[in-house]
Image (cartoon, helix red, strand yellow):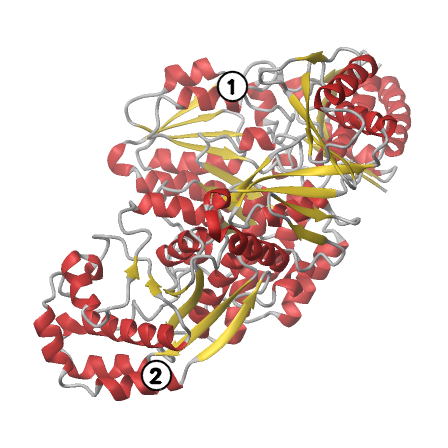
């Protein structure tokens, strides 16, 4: 079928009262970003629905992208027909015939936003229903749970027919909940935390610590690729890389090994907070889950959290590893995450980190360091990259390889 | 020239060869090197692995590269024997396996392992019932091929998998060397299958390369110990040109598989219908779904297999006695013997084996020559 538009129904937005307009504007913006590469689309975000006019673009490719945009409850590919009942009949029969299987049941569901049309809802249902019954032998009408619901919308500019309702990603439009920083390592958990943050409308920017030559270019590219995996939900994401070598070397030199990890993390948090303040972020997200590793005991979280008053949100805190992996697989970050490159969490990992570090001791050991200067120098070395849908970093030869394979 | 010996080996496709050359010339770093050249080679290695995993609908960490079918079979059989030695020393296989499995097992027998060889019926197939009775408490491995290389019988892998559902600890190995691009992917991709072994040159890749599927969580000892490649399970610097070209060959072979299988079936059927009418011909392969679409094994009584092969060769048609591995040794086919075919008929057996490059026109030509030869043999023998 040559569909002419995709009709998008909003999700939780409809319950958001006064903010509704902001939400819809934002969703419209996000959809435009996400569908940027389809040049012929015309996107109109109205109060109750969004209409994406296809003008010849491949509707399946558009729907694939659309499924990843948060804030959409569901959507339907539709065909626009002139307001001529004969033409509507023809298209309706075509639509049914394409999906028809022996014994199939159907119903017509008409909705009119233009009440001036010559037929009312019941008349439309009747006209189309009886026409289909005549034209498609073997089909039956069924009001409860039919195999196919043919939706017919009468609007001022035409009549829209559709029969599929495809689930969207749900959640809230990214950006409607404000901006926050995500501490992105290269592991399984942090991309999942980022995904969950975005799902609730948070506009995230990635903060990634790297320590050359201890960590390789590959580890950095892996983090960028993980970021790229999350871009379809928003269009583009800023990736902020923070040089961490000097801090790690200094900490390693001056702090007893049991507190290496705690103090390194305190630095990461200080840096992320400083970046958030500069970039008007309101909170920090990370992928910590309780009890997975030494840094993730409650004692440890408390000792690390001590350096900031900014909210630290941990979307996966109470999930089991398997639950996290499940989401990572669904959003296709898992295979990347398990690629074995050293990241700055694994190098300088002490043989026996304190699982119950004390805040006073952490503070005491830090007195030996020039914390402010170290933080400042790291901030001075920040690099920001904008990562867009389809970017790849780790495996830039992919195109060359595609020819070989 | 008509090449009907594709179960022995296949022709390397030109586009596969061009990958081989391009990789040899341009991406020749060692995938284990840390520098950019090594990284590039590593990326291509993993990209090839991913392509193969995608084609087989499995995970990327379940594919291990080997030097071919023989290594794969040796690895699964001996690697399992070593790994699971503390748990048992009994192995079950069929009496029609490839020598790579059978001779590996003979070696293990000398080391004190106990092997049960399941009998086959007149079609060369084992029965799941026999398997069930053969299973013991100390059984560690069941190794059954997907497609018999001599007569083309497809083993009842579904039924076997069903029996093994109740014995989750036993390794289930399927030698899939003859099963690529033959429309039996569904059988190979069953959940209960733990190991699959493949050989590149049976599907238009170069010699000396193959791969093994090992289900996540299954443990196997390495046979090649060394520098730790392939997650320390198969050491040795990766043969990257061959690996990349095998990934390509697999993709090309599985493209339009249905259509290709239908064509091979049609050729087989045409030849089958023609020759099976002749009184002196015994056909061992059938046309039903229990046989692969590409193998047709038959005998002309009173004429030695190698005589038939050479007679066809005079007309530029290449077929073989039952399997390439045994054809030069002059021994009768293990599969036919196991099928209880009398020796005097088994020595007359030859095999026609097809692939997607073969055409119906070639079948016509084959039939024409067959008739000429058949009449000639009849005269001599009468």
- Quadrant housing residue A274: bottom left
Vertical side of B10 occupied by B166: above or below:
above
Give the number of callouts: 2
Q: Is residue A386 left or right of residue A141?
A: left
- Quadrant housing residue B363: top right
Q: Compute the Cα span from label 1 to label 2.
A: 69 Å
Q: Position of residue A300 (x, y in %)?
A: 17, 62
Q: Position of residue B33 (x, y in %)?
A: 46, 72
Query: Who is closer to the viewer here, B251 or A297?
Result: A297
Query: Who is closer to the viewer here, A391 or B184?
Result: A391
Could you say whether the residue bearing mark 1 is in a helix, strand or loop?
loop
Q: Which mark is residue A303?
A: none
> In this view of the protein, can residue B86 be seen by the observer?
yes
- Quadrant housing residue B44: bottom right
Could you say whether the residue bearing mark 2 is in a helix, strand or loop?
helix
The chain that hosts pointer 2 is A
Circles 1 and 2 on the same subunit: no
Residue at x-position 73% and y-position 13%? A139
Q: Which mark is residue B126?
A: 1
Q: Quadrant of the C terminus of chain B?
A: top right
Residue at x-position 44% and y-position 63%? A204
> In this view of the protein, can residue B206 be seen by the observer?
no
Vertical side of B46 occupied by B283: above or below:
above
Vertical side of B59 occupied by B113: above or below:
above
Q: Which mark is residue A378?
A: 2
Q: Count neighbours of disc 2 (C-alpha within 10 A) and say few if under 14, some if 14 to 19, many if 20 or more.
A: some
Q: Position of residue A12 (x, y in %)?
A: 47, 43
Residue at x-position 68% and y-position 46%? A51
Q: Quadrant of the N terminus of chain B?
A: top right
């Amino acid at each position: 079928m040559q569909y002419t538009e995709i009709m998008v129904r909003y999700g939780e937005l409809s319950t958001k009262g006064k903010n509704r307009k902001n939400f819809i504007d934002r969703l419209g913006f996000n959809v435009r970003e996400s569908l940027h590469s389809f040049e012929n689309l015309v996107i109109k975000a109205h109060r109750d629905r969004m209409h994406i006019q296809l003008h010849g673009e491949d509707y399946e490719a558009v729907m694939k992208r659309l499924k990843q945009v948060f804030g959409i409850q569901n959507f339907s590919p539709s065909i626009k027909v002139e307001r001529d009942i004969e033409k509507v009949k023809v298209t309706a029969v075509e639509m049914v015939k394409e999906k028809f299987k022996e014994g199939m049941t159907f119903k017509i569901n008409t909705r009119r936003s233009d009440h001036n049309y010559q037929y009312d809802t019941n008349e439309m249902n009747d006209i189309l229903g009886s026409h289909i019954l005549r034209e498609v032998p073997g089909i039956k009408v069924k009001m409860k749970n039919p195999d196919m619901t043919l939706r017919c919308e009468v609007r001022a500019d035409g009549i829209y027919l559709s029969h599929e309702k495809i689930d969207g990603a749900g959640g809230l439009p990214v950006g409607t909940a404000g901006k926050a920083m995500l501490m992105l390592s290269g592991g399984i958990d942090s991309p999942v935390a980022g995904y969950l943050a975005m799902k609730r409308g948070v506009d995230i920017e990635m903060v990634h610590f790297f320590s050359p030559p201890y960590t390789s270019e590959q580890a950095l590219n892996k983090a960028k690729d993980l970021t790229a995996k999350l871009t379809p939900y928003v269009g583009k994401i800023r990736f902020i890389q923070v040089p961490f070598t000097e801090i790690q070397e200094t900490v390693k030199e001056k702090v007893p090994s049991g507190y290496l990890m705690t103090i390194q993390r305190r630095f990461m948090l200080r840096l992320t907070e400083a970046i958030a303040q500069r970039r008007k972020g309101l909170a920090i997200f990370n992928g910590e889950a309780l009890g997975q590793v030494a840094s993730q005991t409650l004692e440890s979280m408390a000792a690390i959290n001590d350096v900031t008053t900014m909210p630290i949100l941990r979307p996966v805190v109470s999930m089991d590893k398997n639950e996290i992996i499940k989401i990572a697989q669904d959003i296709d970050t898992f295979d990347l995450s398990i690629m074995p490159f050293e990241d700055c969490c694994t190098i300088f990992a002490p043989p026996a980190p304190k699982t119950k570090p004390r805040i006073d001791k952490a503070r005491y050991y830090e007195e030996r360091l020039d914390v402010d200067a170290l933080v400042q120098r790291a901030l001075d070395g920040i690099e920001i990259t904008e990562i867009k849908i389809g970017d790849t970093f780790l495996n830039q030869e992919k195109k060359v390889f595609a020819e070989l394979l | 020239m008509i090449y009907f010996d594709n179960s022995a080996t296949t022709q390397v496709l030109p586009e596969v060869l061009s990958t081989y050359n391009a990789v040899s010339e341009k991406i020749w770093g060692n995938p284990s090197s840390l520098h950019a050249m090594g990284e590039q080679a590593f990326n291509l290695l993993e990209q090839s692995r991913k392509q193969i995993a995608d084609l087989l609908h499995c995970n990327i960490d379940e594919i291990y590269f080997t030097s071919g079918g023989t290594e794969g079979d040796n690895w699964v059989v001996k690697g399992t024997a070593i790994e699971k030695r503390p748990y048992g020393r009994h192995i079950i296989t069929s009496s029609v396996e490839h020598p790579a499995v059978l001779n590996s097992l003979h070696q293990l027998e000398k080391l004190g392992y106990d092997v049960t060889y399941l009998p086959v019926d007149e079609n060369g197939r084992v029965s799941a019932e026999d398997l069930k009775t053969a299973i013991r408490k100390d059984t560690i491995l069941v190794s059954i091929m997907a497609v018999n290389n001599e007569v083309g019988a497809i083993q009842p892998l579904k039924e076997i998998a069903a029996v093994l559902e109740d014995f989750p600890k036993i390794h289930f190995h399927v030698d899939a060397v003859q099963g690529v691009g033959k429309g039996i992917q569904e059988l190979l991709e069953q959940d209960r299958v733990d190991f699959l072994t493949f050989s590149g040159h049976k599907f238009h890749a170069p010699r000396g390369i193959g791969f093994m599927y090992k289900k996540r969580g299954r443990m196997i000892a390495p046979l090649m110990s060394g520098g730790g490649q392939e997650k320390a399970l198969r050491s040795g610097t990766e043969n990257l040109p061959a690996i990349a070209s095998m990934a390509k060959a697999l993709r090309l072979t599985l493209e339009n598989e249905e259509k290709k299988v239908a064509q091979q079936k049609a050729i087989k059927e045409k030849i089958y219908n023609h020759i099976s009418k002749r009184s002196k011909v015994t056909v061992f392969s059938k046309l039903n779904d229990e046989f692969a679409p590409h193998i047709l094994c038959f005998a002309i009584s009173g004429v030695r297999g190698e005589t038939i092969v050479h007679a066809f060769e005079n007309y530029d048609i290449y077929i073989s006695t039952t399997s390439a591995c045994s054809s030069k040794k002059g021994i009768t086919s293990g599969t036919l013997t196991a099928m209880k075919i009398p020796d005097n008929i088994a020595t007359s057996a030859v095999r026609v084996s097809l692939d997607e490059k073969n055409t119906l026109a070639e079948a016509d030509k084959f039939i024409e020559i067959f008739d000429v030869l058949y009449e000639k043999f009849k005269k001599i023998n009468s």
